Image (cartoon, rainbow, N blue to C red):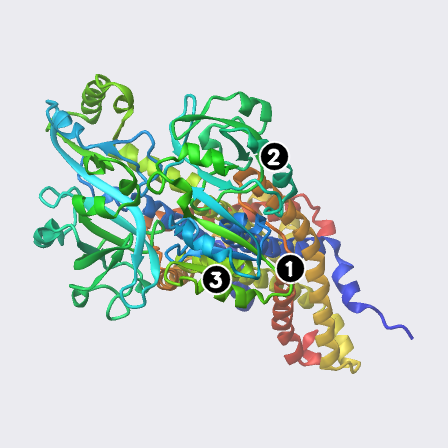
Amino acid sequence: MKQTPLARKNLLDRPSRTAVSAVGVGFAIVLMFMQLGFLGAVGDTATKVYDRTDCDLVIRSPEYLQVFDPRSVPAAIVPMIASIAEVADVRTLDLGLTSWRNPDTGELRGVAIMGIDPERPSLLINELESLTPLLRRPEHVLIDQDSRADYGPKNGIAFGPADVGVETEVTRRKITIAGTFEMGTGLAANGAILLSHTGFNRLAPDRMLLPNSDERVSMLLIRLREGVTSSEGGTAIKERLARLDGRSSAFKVLTIEEAMADERWHWYVRTPVGIIFGIGVAIAVIVGGVICYMVLAADVIARLPEYATLKAIGYSNGYLMKVLLGQAAWLAGLAFAPAVLASLLLYAVTSVYSGVDIRMTSTRILLVGTLSLLMCGTAGWIALRKMTKAEPANLF
Amino acid sequence: MKSTPLAWKNLTADWRRLSLGVAGVAFAAILMFMQNGFRNALLDSPVQLLELLDCDLVAISVARFSLPTDQTFPESLYERSLADADVIAAAPMYLERMRAQVRIAGEPRRPIRVIAMDLKPGWFADEEIESQLSKLKSPLSALLDKRTRSTYGFDLPDPDRVAAQEIELADQSIQIVGFVDIGTDFANDGSLLMSQESFVRYFSNRAGDDPISEIDLALFRIRGEADVNAVAKRLTDLDSRVWKVLPRKNLIRREIQFWNQQTPIGMIFFIGSLMGFAVGIVICYQILFNSIHDSLPEFATLKAMGYGDRFFISLVIKQAIYLSILGFIPAFLISWGLFQAIQWGVGLPMLFTLSRVALVLGLTTAMCLISGLLALRRLLNADPASLF
């Protein structure tokens, strides 16, 4: 005999009530997606720059704080590092934060600045190939197309070809926009510019303070020879650095993976924004669980007489459990697809209005799907416990 | 005849359902409290220093679009402002972060915010700071912000152990002579407060060998009967291309507005609060809907007896308001505990103000009312005969 699909029938019995329940569960799912999305944006911010590098190892100051406040190391160690047998290539990168004057309104904004050697760029940026010659002049900068509209693009939306040749001030010194590139800096700043190492020294506030700042760079990016592992290369470099005396021997040598993990850790744990979204994800999961529990508990209470009858005619607790868990799974399944759609919409809205790029990833969908099934399952199980304990006779 | 308090009786008829409902509403309210609290914490943090000051006007460089931006104005301009008839007291304040590398034996060097002031009493609205300013008279000493993050390696919160630590600022040793409460923010992980004399010794290379010739902020107190805005304008006009003088409250507002607009905080937490509100509506709707649904036969009887729609509407409204108040009280207490825990554990300023509490109470009530009225629709549309 074919078994009655009781879980499904229960849900279809009163579609309006089921719809309300599904909306409740859907909300919980959307909540999780949003908080995870925000947290993801924090993580993306952390590795925006490192993602563009093409290297195995990073050498940086022991005073390094975060990617846009990296402090500096002397450029003089470049030839020394390059002469190590395991090293194939050494490139320099400068990073910092300073002020940008909106060419249109004259208002000041914080901006991320990145300095590279135009002959040997250390960042993988498509536009660089054609624009490199322009960067040989220190007052020429490229501006990130993802910079916010209040940085003053001519068309009022985003920087583009029309802005080439515009003059404005960075750190109160004259610069000229020589072109645009696309990168995005996430939560670290709302705009970014790219220029040569010489240009960077002219504009970076910390370089202006230092004597002989021309001889310093923010970090060195190392590519190792083929066949050399990161740990072999790292050891060789550390040994060479240890022979130097004083502060130079304290330079940090990290693999690019370590640098990225370190940066994510910094953003998740040390910045207020990261901490808050971390707490937000936890809250979302708890809220979701509570909503599911309320939905299922209400359903169990409403159907107590029916369940009691089933129990009285001999159905086991296990069967009832299966029905309710089935119902919970159905609810989660029903709510999931609309919740994903709603979240995609909210991601798009938030991205536009807050300027933070929040993208859906397949891992996140999988994670939230699993979490919502778990959430509904646990809630169903708790809701059921009080029923299984009851005597059929007093359930009516 | 006294009428039966039906709303209250309905709500309390089944205490288990009531507690479920109260928990649900409390949950939504806590969610809104937290989202709002986080938003305010982020926006309150950059102005903590300004909130501690006791002055009418503050002068700031026009290029200093936010407080952590290192832009100064010349001392000569400040001195010209002292001649103004309405200014009764003024003091320069120096801030340094870039050069202020602090190192505790065994830890890497890290930048810290150094705040330097003339030690005349009365510029801080905070008793704890005022009472300790005299300690700063000894050279090369500083007061440490006790909320400074642990990454530096200060042996907080024991004053004797911090005093025993070997600490360097800008490569010269420094003695911590006491603790004050200032707070951290986006840009500053910690603060030291010191005298102008010590400041000159540590940062002798600032502003081309005359460290105090460039001022970060100037504080003014003006005559009681003077018009604050008029004086602010007059002082600004001494050289409006270089500095701006504005009432302290306006500077605080400007700073909060800057962080609200320049970071996605405002938008993200607005969406967060909205979600808390929506979740609350869903939860409340469930509770009120089930409550109405289960008492439908009774309602039908009342309806058949001739009670009008208005009776039912006021009934559900009352029920919703009771529910919101019952849920709000535990939510307030729990949020208060959570706020304290976060403030203590993470160092964010989680402040309860009357207006913020009122906002969440208003939202909670609105949430319950909306869901109550949604749940009511079914009852009003129904025909008594079909309700059984």
Image position, residue A279 (x, y; %): 50, 45
**Chain of the residue displaying label 3:** B
Tell me the quarter of the image containing the C terminus of chain B.
bottom right
Label count reads: 3
Residue A385 left/right relative to A244: right
Kind of element beneath mark 3 = helix
Label 1 sits on residue: A302
Kind of element beneath mark 2 = helix
**Pick the front one: A395 or B232:** B232
- Near mark 1 (Cα within 10 A), the count class, few <14, some 14-19 or many ≥20, is some
- Residue shown at 53% from the left, 68% from the top: B230
Numbered tag placed on residue B235 in the rendering: 3
Sequence order check: which comes first, mark 3 or mark 2? Answer: 2
Numbered tag placed on residue B134 in the rendering: 2
Residue A30 seen anywhere in this rendered image of the structure: no
Give the distance between the C-alpha atoms of the residues marked 3 and 2, in whole angstroms: 31 Å
Q: What type is the residue that disc 2 sits on?
A: Ser
**Chain of the residue displaying label 1:** A
- Near mark 2 (Cα within 10 A), the count class, few <14, some 14-19 or many ≥20, is few
Residue B308 seen anywhere in this rendered image of the structure: yes
Image position, residue A79 (x, y; %): 12, 28
User: Which corner quadrant of the image does residue B387 belong to?
Assistant: bottom right
**Chain of the residue displaying label 2:** B
Residue A358 left/right relative to B335: left
